[in-house]
Amino acid sequence: MVEFREVTKTYAGQPAVHDLTLDIERGAITVFVGPSGCGKTTSLRMINRMVEPTAGSVLVDGQDVSAQPAAALRRSMGYVMQSSGLLPHRTVLDNVATVPRLNGVRRMAARKRAEELLAVVGLAQELGNRYPAQLSGGQQQRVGVARALAADPPILLMDEPFSAVDPVVRAELQQELLRLQQHLAKTIVFVTHDIDEATILGDKLAVFATGGRLAQFGTPEEVLRAPVDEFVAGFVGRDRGFRSLSFNNAAGLTLLPAATATADRAAEAPAEGWLLLTNDGGGPAGWLPPGQRDPAKALIGGSLFTLGSSLRQALDAALSSPSGAGVAIDADGRVAGLIEPSAVLQRLRADGN
């Protein structure tokens, strides 16, 4: 789908990208990751000719992009940037309809397509008549994604699109992108400097080093478990072993029974040991420490993981829990049992990690 062939870009004689040769798979998410100034954004922008290479060639479906009109090339691809780049004087619907209108689609048809895409990216239909300034940062980024998808492009370029929002919204947007990709199967090139974001989203990672050198290209698991040199090892961090737990499924972990009670029955529970409060649907609502059975004093913590998720999530849940045990929940959000860190470590030893 997208090929870089010995591509170099220099500014004032200094290489921003050096001799890049890379094949990007059709229908997959390829993440360009690396420190600031390593050439990842420059490489991305050479795909749609926002930046022209000094040497080498970029091919899309076997055709050199330099032989195509730049404006038409850009309209054939989706592009999402860090600041969303929405037109402040146009409504959400008109922002999303921008590219279809440029491609000659009638206004009513373009707006109908925009309305459909709002639902696709998880936005309420009534937001369509608002202006960008009336939206939260996360909502603006969703609109930016919808606009990039409006012409149904086969290629989606995303230049650090989630870096300007808070961590909670960023995690939501990451999961939303993965959900969309399951249904749309676009060829996505995503730029980030965050190795955690890269390993969450990427089918393949292209790790760029200072000076615009491609240091390693492979799956997230390959990069984390077998960095090719000291630069990559240093960039992914000393805790790369912990990150690699994301590729081990937590299914089959031995769960401990949980002492649970709803808030209105907490006073009846034995005073010794930790008590897990649950809501009426059987989902976790907070922890009460030994000797404390007042629901108003419950400790609320991020100590949940879903059955079938990764060992990293299970270990994180156990380590972050005030009780020392993570709470496993089923697909319906009900408490399934507890997991202690020792059980995760035992599983790792059994798997030979």
Image: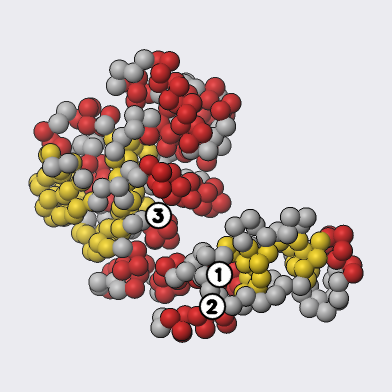
Task: Find residue 314 and name its label.
Answer: 1
What x and y, as percent, mark residue 114?
Answer: 45, 26
What x and y, as percent, mark residue 324?
Answer: 66, 76
Secondary structure of residue under mark 1: helix
Q: Marks 1 and 3: CB-CB under 8 Å?
A: no
Secondary structure of residue under mark 2: helix
Instruction: Tell me the kind of residue under disc 3.
Output: Leu
Q: Is residue 219 left or right of residue 324?
A: left
Q: Marks 3 and 2: CB-CB under 8 Å?
A: no
Residue topped by disc 3? 201
Reading the chain from its start, which is encountered first: label 1 or label 2?
A: 1
Identity of the residue drawn at 56% across and 28% down: 125
Spatial separation of the CA atoms under disc 3 and disc 2: 24 Å
Task: Give 131 or 171, whichever is nearer the viewer.
Answer: 171
Q: Nearer the viewer, mark 3 or mark 2?
A: 2
Residue topped by disc 2? 344
Spatial separation of the CA atoms under disc 1 and disc 3: 19 Å
Q: Marks 1 and 2: CB-CB under 8 Å?
A: yes
Please state the total of marks drawn on the protein image.
3
Instruction: Tell me the kind of residue under disc 1.
Output: Ala
Instruction: Tell me the kind of residue under disc 2.
Output: Val
Quarter of the view holding residue 203: bottom left
Sort mark 3 into few (<14), some (14-19) or many (20+) by Cα contacts within 10 Å: many
